[in-house]
Image (tube, rainbow, N blue to C red):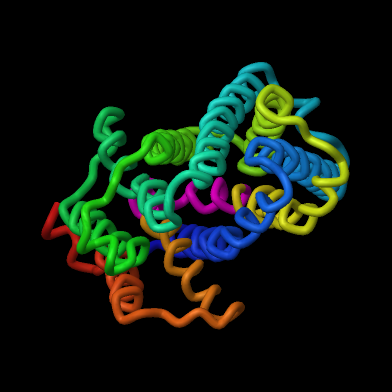
Amino acid sequence: MKKKETFGSIILFITALIWGCAFVAQKVGMDYIGPFTFCGVRFLFSALFLIMVVIIRDLFLYKKIQIFYMNKKDLKELLIGGTCCGIALAVATMLQQFSMQGTTAGKAGFTTALYIVLVPLFGLFIKKKVNTLEWISVGIALISLVLLCFKKEELTNNLIITGYDFGLLACAICFSTQILFIDHFSKKADPIYLATIEFIVCAILGIIAMFIFEKPNIESINKALIPILYAGIASGGIAYTLQFIGQKHVNPVIASLIMSLEAVISLIAGAILIKERLTPQELLGCLLMFIAIIIPQIKFKKIFK
């Protein structure tokens, strides 16, 4: 693996690590506020954090705010890329947050993570070649997610599909679209600027949805402030910026596999932080996920192209 690909893979693993720990914050936050309020305020903190990061970085490194000195072509590319990513991410996150209210955690985790299958499928339409080893990895990762996300009783009985489950499927489609947008635009523009525009768009859409569908109040938001700050700054501002940086050097199929490690990390975090015990089924799922990520990296992969 090239040094840049290794660097990108490490960055994406850190992203998955942050996201895996964010699940608790999302659940706790909705004890006090609605899903759209959570997303709206979360996105606002993400946008403010990244604006501050960009200003400090530019003044320290370049002695000027670069965006004000960009040529029209680069600025247009940046704004289009950030807006496309922002719309896809905002819709995906709000659908996820809303749909989690009416389905099981297992189905929520599994359906959302279907982006590992959708990314290579959608990639075919834009002529993104997927080799045999990558398809094998996607299949193994899908089996892993079944083991990780569903309890034994759910696997042995018929699963009921609800409207909320279709909401999560739409969420997975939007996450897949965002990953492919990032793959396209991160190679042409500054990833930190792209992430900043992305979250400004997310904040605008989130706040609009918050006021249309809910009645937010300061007292409830204050009670959920710590989960919101984690989701907004760590999971949002930091992790999604790392996603832009990592995906710049990693192909989207491998990137989606690495980022799907958040399902594994969420289970491990639960075992460490709140003493939840991993079942043999979940341990097998963790092992299969790691295998799925390692397979495309093996040296003789050219044989299978």
Seen at 44% across and 37% down, the residue is 171
Residue 177 sits in quarter:
top left
- Outermost residue toward the top in this view: 72
Q: Is residue 60 above or below residue 208?
A: below
Judging depth in this view, the residue of 150 and 142 nearest the camera is: 150
Judging depth in this view, the residue of 110 and 245 nearest the camera is: 110
Seen at 51% across and 31% down, the residue is 88
Q: Is residue 200 above or below residue 235?
A: above
Q: Is residue 75 above or below residue 107?
A: above
Seen at 86% across and 37% down, the residue is 64
Left or right: where 23 falls relative to 71 = left
Q: Main secondary structure of the magenta part?
A: helix
Seen at 19% across and 62% down, the residue is 301
Can residue 180 be seen from the camera position used here?
Answer: no
Please give the count of numbered marks on the rendered protein.
0
- Residue 56 in percent (x, y) is at 85, 47
Q: Which residues are magenta?
A: 241-256
Left or right: where 299 falls relative to 198 = left
Residue 11 sits in quarter:
bottom right
- Residue 47 in percent (x, y) is at 74, 39
Question: Any magenta on residue 246?
Answer: yes
- Residue 157 in percent (x, y) is at 22, 59
Left or right: where 113 falls relative to 51 = left
Question: Any magenta on residue 296?
Answer: no
